[in-house]
Image (tube, grey):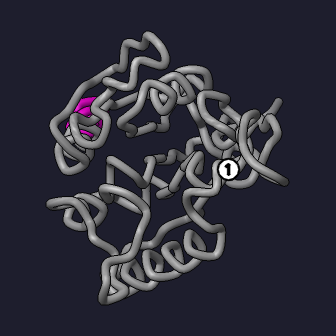
Amino acid sequence: MAKIPDKQGIFFELDGVLVERAALAADGSVPFLDRAIEALGRIDTRQFGIFVATSRRDIAFGELKEREFTRFCEAFLARMQQEQIKITKIYSCPYHPKGKGRFKKESVFRKPGPGIFKMAQQEFDLNLQRSWMIGHTTADILAGQRAELGTILVRTGKAGQDGEFTVEPHFVEDDFWHAIARVNQFEYSLRV
């Protein structure tokens, strides 16, 4: 009989959740939203893997060059290393069915599809039903729901007002800091 995995993950979108958008500041730093770094530091990495789950529509439509996003991710990971916050993996999907050039194609990894979560489940033996998706769009929440994750919509970024899908997240919080506080509170209540 297969063992039920007990590893958990916290997935989040970058834009609108951790940063306003995935672009470096003039000085080459990552312009984090208020208390985002502090929130990341409050995640118990003995319990959770920390994953970025981002659909890069801006790359698909030529609004952001792939190499610019790569530079952003390198700066983000360098800052996380300085802060001693271990990011398990960054999953990103640069494809869109109406995109441009080589980015014009359908992909199971583009949200609201659950492909990113299924891939992480295979790679890291995660229990998705004990994992979380924190996002700011209805596609973020729907993707998490399709993969059976707990879902938290934050009121930053698009705050679920994109009108793309009708969703009912498990929780709605003001920002990423409050979303992580909610996860920690929920997990604590299960152990008491």
Amino acid type of disc 1?
Answer: Ala
Between 123 and 56, the residue placed more toward the observer is 56
Q: Which residue is drawn at 66% across and 31% down?
A: 114
The x, y position of residue 104, in whole percent, is 79, 43
The x, y position of residue 57, in whole percent, is 59, 46
Q: How crowded is mark 1: few (under 14 residues within 10 Å), some or many (20 or more)?
A: many
Judged left or right of residue 52, residue 137 is left
Judged left or right of residue 128, residue 172 is left
Q: From this view, report whether residue 38 is shown above or below residue 133.
A: below
Q: In which quarter of the image is the N terminus?
A: top right
Residue 169 image-quadrant placement: top left
Q: Which residue is drawn at 58% across and 61% down?
A: 90
Between 17 and 81, the residue placed more toward the observer is 17
Q: Which residue is drawn at 45% across and 72% down?
A: 86
Query: How many dots with numbers?
Result: 1
| Magenta residue check for 121 | no
The x, y position of residue 75, in whole percent, is 45, 82
Q: Is mark 1 on a helix, strand or loop?
A: helix
Between 177 and 34, the residue placed more toward the observer is 34
Q: In which quarter of the image is the C terminus?
A: top left
Circle 1 residue: 60
Q: Which residue is drawn at 67% across and 38% down?
A: 110
The x, y position of residue 87, in whole percent, is 49, 67
Between 9 and 29, the residue placed more toward the observer is 29
Q: From this view, report whether residue 55 is shown above or below residue 130.
A: below
Range of residues picked out in magenta: 185-192
